[in-house]
Amino acid sequence: MSEALHAVDLIRKKRDGEELSAEEIRFLVAGAAQEKIPAEQLSAWLMAVFLRGLSLAELDTLTTAMRFSGEVLDHMGLGRRTVDKHSTGGVGDKTSFLVAPIAAAAGLADPMISGRALGHTGGTLDKLESIPGYRTQLSLAEMRQVLEQCGASIVGQTRNLVPADRKLYSLRDRTATVENPYLICASIMSKKLAASLDALVIDVKTGSGAFLRNEEDAQFLAALMVETGERAGTRTVAVLTDMSQPLGRFAGNWVEVQEALALLRNERDRLREDLREISLVLAGWMIFLGGKAPSAKEGRTIAEQKLADGSALRIFRAMVAAQGGSLDALDAGASFHRPRFRREFRAPRGGYFTSADCTKIGWAVQRLGAGREQAGEPVEAHAGLEMLVKLGDPVEAGQPLANLFTQEEARFAEPEHLLSAALLIGDEPVPPPLLMRQVISLDNKNMFLQRRSAS
């Protein structure tokens, strides 16, 4: 008989920098999923991991145990390879609404399990729920039906999908252990791998609006996720992308759906070209990894064709209808956007838009009512912000830099204060930021993993 395991012994072991066995990690994950280990002990173990880290073997075991702690999706008989995209979070990041229908239009299936707004970043589910009637909580059987009909389905995590992650993440959020690459990786990858994907593209944000602002930290997290995905048999690539300013021109809920629809209708706008380009690159990688193109570059070409011929738009509309959403709202477009109050935020002086604290901008959007500080808080469908300039643009004194939308006039004060500190005007022009910083794949991941180990 093996010795009985006790959580306090495993806390002590990790606290002292020792490596846990696979059996010990599986014991902790099962205890979290079944709520057999007290929250204070799980919290102590999370802090020990936060301070001591994990080996690649520990991370692999942790992710696998979390992945199989509940239900997993089964795509047998679907007739399509399954691919998905995940973003580590940003401001104005609505690429999901573009890449999922593009990939489906290319003959793939995207079973996308998404999350809600928390902190300064928006939530895909909150944005979709601004479409009247859209259901984000589907059973696995219902999700399968939507996939068979449309090729894409964007839903929330079910109660029985990766329950260990739900428990551990709720503790991480309350114990200052969120910003840890090992725990971030295990959380993201356990949910994505539970979707039984053939391929996964990860959009790792870096810059002032990212959770990991330091580019080396972002590279390491990207390499960890590629390593974890490949170990599980899922082809995985990570693309480091810029989050030094909001992506596109809108940040909020309905306004982001509205902007994605404009791009799906193949409407071009200088202020949303960054959103279009990043979406096409990510979709190109999905199409390549899914076996529908011989390279990511040719995948991007196919992705652009799916925008131009309207097939991606048709799939997005079909998905919305299949999940109960109102097509009348989609067709109403900008006229459906009905905030009670609007206000312009103007430049204090002339010069050039030289710097943006994108995290502060995200908090401004949240304070307008579009996000939440704590899980379960309601969000406003029509709250948000429209950026009218991009980094490097010349501006004149008094020129509008942004439009603010809210349902309560009293909400304007704090966002305006945040934007005053976030949007900086300088005397000299700056070059636009580099959108795509790096691609990390099976071929080069070890370089970034070894670099962190050496340091």
Image: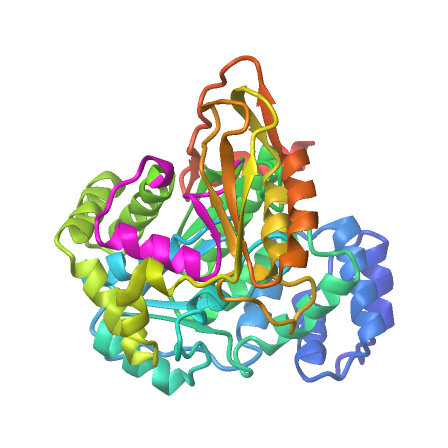
Residue 183: in sight, yes or no? no
x%, y% of residue 342?
Answer: 52, 52
Judge whether 389 appears above or below 148 on screen: above
Magenta residues, start to end: 245-272
Q: Residue at x 23, y 46 (%)?
A: 267
| Residue 208 found in image quarter | top right
Residue 262 is inside the magenta segment: yes
Nearest the viewer among 365 and 312 is 365
Q: Residue furthest top?
A: 428
51 relative to 318 in the view: left or right: right
Which color scheme is applied? rainbow
Nearest the viewer among 357 and 191 is 357
Judge whether 160 appears above or below 294 on screen: below
Residue 289 is inside the magenta segment: no
x%, y% of residue 77?
Answer: 23, 80
x%, y% of residue 407?
Answer: 57, 63
Q: Residue at x 69, y 66 (%)?
A: 374
